[in-house]
């Protein structure tokens, strides 16, 4: 992008970093702008109370933006519109920041065209890529000041007034920009024509969405938007600003301007739908479907619809759509047959089974319809009934006959559905019963008597009942008792959470333990968790078959130990260690501690040390924790050479910032005597290749001479130091 043609380079004004007296364009304004070509670091100090402050930034190269100050909360909107996206925009809510750039495939379109700096050539910059200084004409590398100001006033919308515009070609100078000091350029009035495709931001419009082909052919024309980088291309394969269309369809045009020139990503494209110019359309849909009219509206009702379509030349075409609804059927049939017969279904297949049959079919008009058949198959019964009566009772057969003797009886009859059926009755005559029962249970164990009564009292019970056949009978029930065996235990009442599973021991083994934390014959405190008491139940069957056992309480406790957060001291300092624990404490190693068994102790180690805290509570539960005291050497010596010889002899071949106390190089930049940035590194560890300059620029060796540098470094003590000076390159 920055490598312009030889003709354009003649117009590139790059005389170095210029200085301007800062001015305020309108003290009642609320729009502050910053623009250049080379980017750099932009520190904006909002030191003046401007309500609803809006900030606009445009650069070609990457810029790192920091917004801060007493009134930074007044900033309501920030827009970056340039070529490369910013490295960062810090200090404001990301929700109020908008970024237009190539890296996000949304380069902003200017609302005014660039200058025709070469006679006969289209305007060079029709999009926002960078500033090029305080000028009413762009200089081949960026936008003119009127373009920049008008773009941001349009983007920020009504009520936006220019407060100041700071612009230059080179990188932003070091230090802070005070909003109260304004800028150096107040140009607002446009000096070029409006951009015909500007809609707002990165939005644009080359062609209308649709048009009508009411004549034999129609001309699609985008010649109102001339470009530098070649002729427009159409999806038909044609090249040029116009396309003659003689049939309906979708037509797509792609245009390359100064910024949108990459066919792989963010090329300017637009689509137009050429629709036929019809008069009357007779059509039909099935009931329940929808129809899309030529104007895009969707209808579901029958009727005549009149639609007026406007062609690209402004002429109207009227389309009449006669829409008919075709019927859709849902038929429900109920039918029945006797068992053994065959039924022919609506689709011609047959069945002998009861069920719901659903058939989908198309009507003569092609609409989906449904027949639902509920088919019942009535049985031709051949049923056998097994019945019983008590002595001296009668039984009523299906035909109404009374019988009292055991035997087999056959009756034939016709069902309501008209199907022949046979019922065979096998009759049994049962006697009345007297049943004697004798049982023994454990003391306290309940027994349900045959009459439903619950008891545990030994006795003989006479219980009348009706037998399963309904006959009057008697049960004589005798209840006896066994005494269960007593169980003793050896189970602890308190255990530590970190203890291994404990064995549950009782005097009568062979039973089952159950409860929280129990597995087999062990109790695992880690599974139960802290708390309790947890009641562990035990059940076992004694020699008499009685269930005995008991419930045993177990409480799980856990000690705790907290040595506090890791801390950092210098080798001359003292660290305070504070313990929180549920029992007595011990610190280790005890070297260089004021007290090894105190909750608060002090360490004056001169090297990084990790201490272990151990606590034992009254129940013998152990807890541990660790804390690390990091020790920093407080050396703050910094060494910066004033010459270096990048000749490849292995000695003094690179220029870097040295010092044992340096932990981070925030920025390190080198400039030539014209202020051109030729090397920069950010957030780099010292002594790394990325933090060393080898005397080259863009892969080529630079001439020997004096170069300027600036740097911001952070020391192990936390201090940040700003450095600047000169370095002499000797070859």
Image: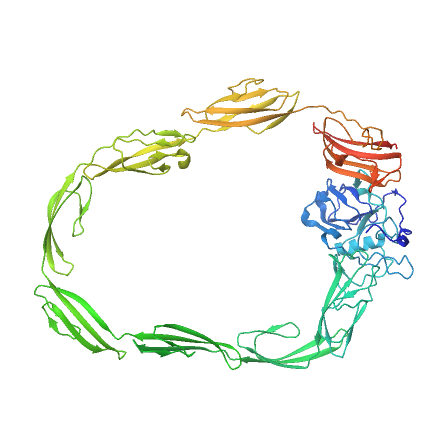
Q: Is residue 407 above or below residue 460?
A: below
Q: Residue furthest left?
A: 392
| Viewer-closest of 216 and 563 | 216
Residue 86 shows in this picture: yes
In this figure, what is the number of numbered marks? 0
Where does the image place residue 708, in percent across and percent down from the top left?
85, 35
| Viewer-closest of 521 and 35 | 521
| Viewer-closest of 427 and 647 | 647
> Does 600 sit left or right of 273 as displayed?
left
Q: Please state, as top left, top right, bottom left or bottom right, where the C terminus lies in the image.
A: top right
Q: Is residue 388 above or below residue 571?
A: below
Where does the image place residue 395, in percent across and percent down from the top left?
13, 69
Q: Quadrant of residue 345?
A: bottom left
Where does the image place residue 480, in percent across and percent down from the top left?
13, 42
Q: Is residue 117 above or below residue 713?
A: below
Look at the image and name its color scheme.
rainbow
> Does 479 sit left or right of 1 as displayed?
left
Q: Quadrant of residue 554?
A: top left
> Does 535 sit left or right of 20 as displayed?
left
Q: Quadrant of residue 530?
A: top left
Where does the image place residue 117, in percent across and percent down from the top left?
90, 57
Q: Is residue 384 above or below residue 556?
A: below
Residue at 47% in and 27% down: 623
| Viewer-closest of 403 and 5 | 5
Residue 396 shows in this picture: no
């Amino acid at each position: 992008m920055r490598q312009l043609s030889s003709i354009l380079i003649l117009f590139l004004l790059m005389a170095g970093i210029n200085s301007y007296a800062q001015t305020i364009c309108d003290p009642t304004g609320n729009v502050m702008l910053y623009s250049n070509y080379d980017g750099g670091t932009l520190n904006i100090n909002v030191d003046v109370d401007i309500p609803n402050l809006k900030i606009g930034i445009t650069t070609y190269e990457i810029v790192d933006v920091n917004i801060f100050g007493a009134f930074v909360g007044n900033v309501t909107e920030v827009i970056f519109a340039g070529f490369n996206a910013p490295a960062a925009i810090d200090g404001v809510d990301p929700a109020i920041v908008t970024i237009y750039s190539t890296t996000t495939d949304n380069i902003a379109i200017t609302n005014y065209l660039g200058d025709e700096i070469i006679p006969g050539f289209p305007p060079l910059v029709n999009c926002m890529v960078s500033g090029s200084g305080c000028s009413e004409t762009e200089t081949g590398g960026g936008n003119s000041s009127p373009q920049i100001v008008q773009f941001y006033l349009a983007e920020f919308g009504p009520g936006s007034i220019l407060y100041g515009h700071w612009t230059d070609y080179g990188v932003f100078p070091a230090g802070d920009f005070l909003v109260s000091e304004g800028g150096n350029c107040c140009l607002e009035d446009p000096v070029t024509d409006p951009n015909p495709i500007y809609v707002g931001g990165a939005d644009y419009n080359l062609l209308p969405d649709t048009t009508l082909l009411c004549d034999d052919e129609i001309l699609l024309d985008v010649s109102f938007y001339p470009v530098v980088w070649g002729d427009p291309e159409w999806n038909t394969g044609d090249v040029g600003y116009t396309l003659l269309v003689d049939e309906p369809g979708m037509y797509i045009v792609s245009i390359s301007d100064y910024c949108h020139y990459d066919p792989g990503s963010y090329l300017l494209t637009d689509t137009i739908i050429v629709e036929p110019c019809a008069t009357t359309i007779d059509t039909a849909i099935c009931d329940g479907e929808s129809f899309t009219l030529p104007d895009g509206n969707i209808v579901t009702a029958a009727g005549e619809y009149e639609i007026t379509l406007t062609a690209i030349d402004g002429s109207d075409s009227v389309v009449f759509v006669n829409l008919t609804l075709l019927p859709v059927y849902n038929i429900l049939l109920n039918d029945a047959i006797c068992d053994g017969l065959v039924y022919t279904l609506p689709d011609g297949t047959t069945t002998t089974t009861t069920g719901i049959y659903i058939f989908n079919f198309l009507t003569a008009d092609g609409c989906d319809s449904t027949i639902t058949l509920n088919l019942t198959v009535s049985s031709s019964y051949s049923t056998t009934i097994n019945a019983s009566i008590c002595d001296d009772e009668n039984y009523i057969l299906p035909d109404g006959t009374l019988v009292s003797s055991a035997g087999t009886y056959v009756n034939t009859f016709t069902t309501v559905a008209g199907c022949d059926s046979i019922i065979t009755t096998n009759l049994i005559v049962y006697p009345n019963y007297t049943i004697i029962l004798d049982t023994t249970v454990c003391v306290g164990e309940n027994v349900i008597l045959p009459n439903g009564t619950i008891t545990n009292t030994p006795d003989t019970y006479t219980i009348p009942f009706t037998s399963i056949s309904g006959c009057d009978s008697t049960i004589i029930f005798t209840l006896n008792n066994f005494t269960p065996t007593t169980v003793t235990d050896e189970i602890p009442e308190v255990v530590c959470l970190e203890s291994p599973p404990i064995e549950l021991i009782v005097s009568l083994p062979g039973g089952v333990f159950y409860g929280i934390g129990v597995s087999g014959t062990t109790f695992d405190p880690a599974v139960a968790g802290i708390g309790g008491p947890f009641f562990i139940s035990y059940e076992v069957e004694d020699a008499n078959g009685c269930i005995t056992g008991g419930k045993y309480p177990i409480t799980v406790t856990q000690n705790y130990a907290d040595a506090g957060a890791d801390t950092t001291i210098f080798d001359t300092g003292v660290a305070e260690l504070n313990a929180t624990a549920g029992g007595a404490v011990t610190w280790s190693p005890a070297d260089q501690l004021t007290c090894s068994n105190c909750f608060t102790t002090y360490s004056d180690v001169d090297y990084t040390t990790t201490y272990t805290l151990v606590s034992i509570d009254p129940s013998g539960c152990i807890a541990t924790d660790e804390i690390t005291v990091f020790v920093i050497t407080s050396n703050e010596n910094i060494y910066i050479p004033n010459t270096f010889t990048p000749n490849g002899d292995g000695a003094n071949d690179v220029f870097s910032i040295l010092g044992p106390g340096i932990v981070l190089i925030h920025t390190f930049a080198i400039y030539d005597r014209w202020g051109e940035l030729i090397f920069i590194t950010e957030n780099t560890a010292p002594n790394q290749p990325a933090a060393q300059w080898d005397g080259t620029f863009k892969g080529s060796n630079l001439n020997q001479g004096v170069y300027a540098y600036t740097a911001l470094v952070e020391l192990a003590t936390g201090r940040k130091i700003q450095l600047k000076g000169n370095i002499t390159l000797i070859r």
